[in-house]
Amino acid sequence: MTWLNRFNFKKHPFFATILLFIVVVLIMIFSAGSGEYPLSPQNVLSALFGLGDDFARTIVIDFRLPRIVMALFVGISLAVSGAILQGITKNPLASPDLIGITAGASFAVVLFLSLFSDENNSLMVSIHWLPLFAFLGATLTALIVFFLSWKNGIAPFRLLLIGIAVAAFMNAGTTIWMLMGPIYRASQATIWTTGSIYGANWSQVKVLVPWSILLIVIALLLRRQMNILELGDDIATSVGSQVQKNRVILLLISTGLTGVAVAFAGGIGFVGLLAPHIARRIVGPKFQTMILFTAGIGALLVLVADWIARVAFAPIEVPAGVWTAAVGAPYFIFLLLTERRRGRV
Amino acid sequence: MLHTNLTRGWGIAVSIIAILFLMLSSLVYGYTDTTWTDAYLAFMKPNGSNEHLIIKDVRLPRSLIAAFIGACLGVSGAIMQSITRNPLSSPSILGVNAGASFFVVIGVVFFSVQSLQSYMWLSFAGAAFAFSLVFILSSAGREGLTPLKLTLAGSAITALFASFTQGLLVLNETALDQVLFWLAGSVANRPLDLLINALPYIVVALLVAFIKAKELNVLSIGDDVAVGLGQKTFWTKLYFGALAVVLAGCAVAVAGPIGFVGIIIPHVIRSIVGLDHRWILPYSAFGGATLLLIADIGSRYVLMPQELPVGVMTALIGVPFFIYVARKKMGV
């Protein structure tokens, strides 16, 4: 990517981030305009500001916008979660889906849906509890994985191997719960576990967005601690950082973000792995500067994946998770080969 | 444990008896209450009652399929662990199962494949494709093939194929109905014809593997020594790889992707009979059959009256084992 180097975004990360955010907004507008009933960007904008005809307003605001906002925040949450995880484990291959955290959250969500649904498939408790459940599932799984990977410290590769195994276990658990529930819920859940934003509505968005923003703000407040942690435990302790406490808090933020994303969009894979790597490549490795850029890249990935999911084979939806995996899995193998050579893992 | 060829030979006899006993149990135990007498009468004096029909037409195919597919998975795992020198190798971990399923689903979605024979060939092709892909990818780079790269590349390829499979199934709902249950990995409700179709390949591959097993012993000393002893290591790896792929492909074509049998069994067997592949391979066949039969009988009782796909059972048993191996033997 020589043209990127010529601009040297690493010297102007602020400029790069602004540019990225503009791209994200443009994608959102174009995505809102495409579909079975296409709208020009001007029409989308006028619909957003309450102008234009009723039909266009209904389509944009009631149908397409909740999905787009959902994709935006799911992408941001997964990306930031991945960046934090890679930082605290000092493992460039870590991401919530690869080390089983997503599978744990999925298990918790299926558990929640099957425990608290009545015969009519409607929830008996408020949907506001769903992210909490997903968060608990994600956190417990993360603790199990860390505990099982511990042997005089957590070696990067051991973490991944144990994560793969725990993910398989959680998926088996998910299958059992799906089989125990009514059959129609099982077929819904199959699509949902691949990761899809199909059927997002404003009431879900209203639960997702505040949590996501809250956790990201805390992550931003702790960005200095994150940088210190990345220097290594010894240096971090000597500059007065409470290493273990900060690490636990950051882990909880990371699992919380994965939890809220999974609660509403299922396991959209590889975003937490891809986004931080792309961001580091463009704006450099410093956590303070890369974290916002990572969030933007995550949003971009999920927005585009969901856009393709909606449009590519319309009227059929191919889950967004399929598209992120198509990009993410080859990239993971590429990292596996190159990072190993550089001696980082 | 079994250190002389005599005790090992007796061990084989005991395993055969154990497997026959499990196969008979598989005919008798389940949701429909039947007794050993029913099982006997169903074959000797069938009276057309529900119990007899269930035993003959539902449970007999199931128990045969569990036994043969278990054997395939066990031997396939043992060969893969040996030629890749990776204690975590197995058809599910290296992406072979996912590749085979993906190819079968492509066949169903795009070419409306129906015949059992073409299931088989698609499954072989997918297994071979995934295995070579993972092998080549993880051999790239300066230090060559390492167990870790192989395992992680395998899981990435699995994720890739699995999500493509999902995508294809969403595109085509009739295909979804046709293959969804098969994709869960189960030995229940499979037509016996599937197994009969695969049987020639299974038997030939197993026999060739047993006869040639000595070459795996030479290989396991190390490539340099093997070359020094006059073995063409590349070819040995290639045709044993092909055997492992055929066995895994047959297993997927008949029962769908079933994980973790191929990883557990070779470890257990090595700790029982030692490091001689002439014993490891046949014992892995019996061990795989035993494990899958037990898992299948268990899968009828966990969620009674519903049944669990046997792949879920093997995952629940296999994961703790995988973690144990990853912690003890992977050197990471």
Image (cartoon, coloured by chain):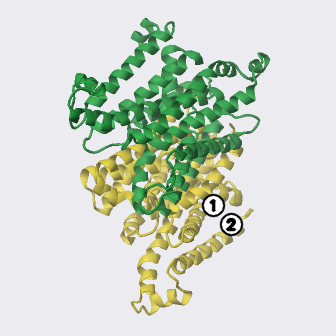
Q: Is residue A79 above or below residue A318?
A: above
Q: Residue at x 51, y 29 (%)?
A: A79
- The chain drawn in yellow is B
Residues at discs 2 and 1 both on one chain: yes
Q: Is residue A336 above or below residue B313?
A: above
Which residue is painted at 40% across and 32% down in the image? A69
Q: Position of residue A306 (x, y in %)?
A: 36, 35
Residue designated by label 2:
B8
Q: Circle 1 sits in a helix, a strand or a loop, which is it?
A: helix
User: Mark 2 belongs to which subunit?
Assistant: B
Task: Please tell me in which quadrant of the rendered image residue B280 appears.
Answer: bottom right
Local crowd at mark 1 within 10 Å, few (<14), some, or many (≥20)? many
Amino acid under disc 2:
Arg
> Is the residue marked by circle 2 packed among few (<14), some (14-19), or many (20+) residues within 10 Å?
some
Instruction: Specify the colour of chain A.
Output: green
**Location of the C terminus of chain A (image quadrant):** top right
Residue type for callout 1: Trp
Q: Which residue is mark 1?
A: B279
Q: For the residues labelled 2 and 1, say whether their Cβ atoms are less than 8 Å apart.
A: yes
